[in-house]
Image (cartoon, rainbow, N blue to C red):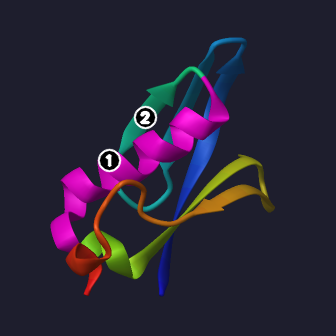
Amino acid sequence: MREIVFRVLAERPGHLEAQAETLPIRITAPTLEELQHEAREALIDHLGLAHCTFRVRVRRDPGTAVSSIRPVGRPAALCR
């Protein structure tokens, strides 16, 4: 499985902004949980069904993983 890392660029109360390291994807959200969801949604928009072959990680500091998520709200059949 491949991995897409989103680096948090800006973090203030109620606003997080992140950029994918290897793809031209930039996302914003008010919370870390919603940032994770936005990362997966942006990956789905960018890659289509191929998003199932990627793990998404959100990092605040270099080398420190904040989270790892799988597809959210999508039927498993789409990922086969």
Q: Is residue 79 above or below residue 11?
A: below
Q: Residues within 10 Å of mark 2 (few under 14, many from 20)?
A: some
Are the two marked residues, 2 and 1, in contact with CB atoms closer than 8 angstroms? yes
Residue visible at 72% across and 12% down in the picture? 13
Dominant SS of magenta comes to helix
In the rendered view, does 56 fall on the left or right side of 67? left
Question: For the magenta stretch, what is the residue range?
Answer: 31-49
Q: Nearer the viewer, residue 35 or 72?
A: 72
Q: In x, y percent, where is residue 33?
A: 61, 38
Residue 44 drawn in magenta: yes
In space, the residues marked 2 and 1 are separated at their CA atoms by 8 Å
Residue 69 drawn in magenta: no
- Closer to the chain start, of discs 2 and 1, is 2
Residue visible at 65% across and 35% down in the picture? 32
Identify the element where label 2 is drawn: strand
Residue at numbered disc 2 = 27
Residue at numbered disc 1 = 42
Q: In x, y percent, where is residue 25?
A: 35, 45
Name the residue type under label 2: Ile
Q: Nearer the viewer, residue 14 or 76?
A: 76
Q: Is residue 26 above or below residue 61?
A: above
Confirm whether residue 14 shows in the render: yes
Q: Is residue 32 above or below residue 49?
A: above
Q: Quadrant of the C terminus?
A: bottom left
Identify the element where label 1 is drawn: helix
Q: In x, y percent, where is residue 41?
A: 33, 48
Name the residue type under label 1: Ala
Q: Is residue 63 above or below residue 42?
A: below
